[in-house]
Image: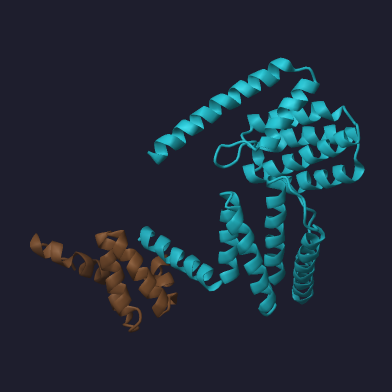
Chain colours: A brown, B cyan
Amino acid sequence: MKKSKFFELLSSFNKKQLQELSKLIKNNEEENLIGLFNYLSIHIPSKSNDTVFSREAVLRNLYKNKLDEKNYKIY
Amino acid sequence: MNDGVKLCEWVIIKQDIENDKFKQQIILADYYQKHQLNKYFNQHINSIKEEIRLNKENRNTYYYLYKLEYLVIEQELITNLRKINYSKLSTYLNIFYEIEQLKIKCVTITSLHNDLQLLPLKSILYEQYHNCYTLLKSETEEEYIKFWNELVLVAESIEKADLGLIVNIFYSFCISQLNKNNIVFYEHLLNAYIFSLENNILFEDNDLLLPSHFKNIITISLRLNKLDYAYEFEINIKTIFLKITKKMFITIT
């Protein structure tokens, strides 16, 4: 995830830019994108450790609810 | 994720435009001109010039002054009025260009690799404007025919706005020659108009035709004894005009 363009652009954004992007993303109504943005916008500014940005961690957070409903487990 | 990247890029672009008030003003002036909001265009140009004058000089100052001057001249060409002194255009562009040239020279000297020297220009658009310039300086029919044929050959590769402007320069040249009683240019001017019609550059953005162009085409066709063409052209314009009126009526209702 850390190597993706979206992540790198988000990391370069200041507070004002993040607010602007947040409005655009919410208008976009793309559920996955909103989820991904919400997750990253919490962890990027707080400089969380690398594990929260791993592909697995991001996917687990994004699809947690849906997978739980179907009794799937992801590792 | 691609949508996310696009939105991020849009935020970056938007913020850049938001921070550059002159860029915003130029965009607005351009819009007023393209949509023939002449009153707002003139008001806007004057207020931007004043604002630029009151601000500190920066790397873009002369570029914006040049853009403004260019828009005003373009407006005069579109409305077929020539009032202002065009020399400021070259002054502003020259200052901007010289500053940029000096920057490039400085960068070239400080570069470890000697590969920043100017290369010969190979742009179609550059060649076309260069041809126009040579033509206006030389004022010969041979040059006109040569450059016109070159333009026709590359017309497909040039965007409409620039093609329109280049053809406008050719019209102006023909008209200036006709004013000097050089009547061979009737034929050339008519050909230029026919070319514009075929390439969809004679009509304005709102599909209307300037009365000056309409009158010129009819007058030249009559002077060249091309009565059929004049008649056919008038009928075509009437048909187009009726279609536009209908479309406007439907839009309004």
Look at 57% across and 25% down and name the residue there: B238
In the rendered view, does B205 fall on the left or right side of B183?
A: left
> Could you tell me which quadrant the C terminus of chain B lies in?
top left
Toward which corner of the image does residue B46 lie, by quadrant?
A: bottom right
Spot occupied by residue B102 in the image (x, y as percentages of width and height): 79, 72
Q: Can the viewer see residue B46 in this picture?
A: yes
- Image mark count: 0
Look at 82% across and 43% down and name the residue there: B131
> Could you tell me which quadrant the N terminus of chain B lies in?
bottom left
Image vertical order of residue A60 relative to residue B180, above or below: below
Q: Can the viewer see residue A55 in this picture?
A: no
Spot occupied by residue A19 in the image (x, y as percentages of width and height): 36, 74
Look at 55% across and 28% down and name the residue there: B240
Look at 67% across and 66% down and name the residue there: B64
Spot occupied by residue B98 in the image (x, y as percentages of width and height): 80, 68
Identify which residue, B8 or B119, lies in the foreground. B8
Q: Residue furthest top?
A: B228
Spot occupied by residue B7 in the image (x, y as percentages of width and height): 40, 63
Identify which residue, B34 or B148, lies in the foreground. B34
Identify which residue, B76 or B154, lies in the foreground. B76
Toward which corner of the image does residue B95 lie, by quadrant?
A: bottom right
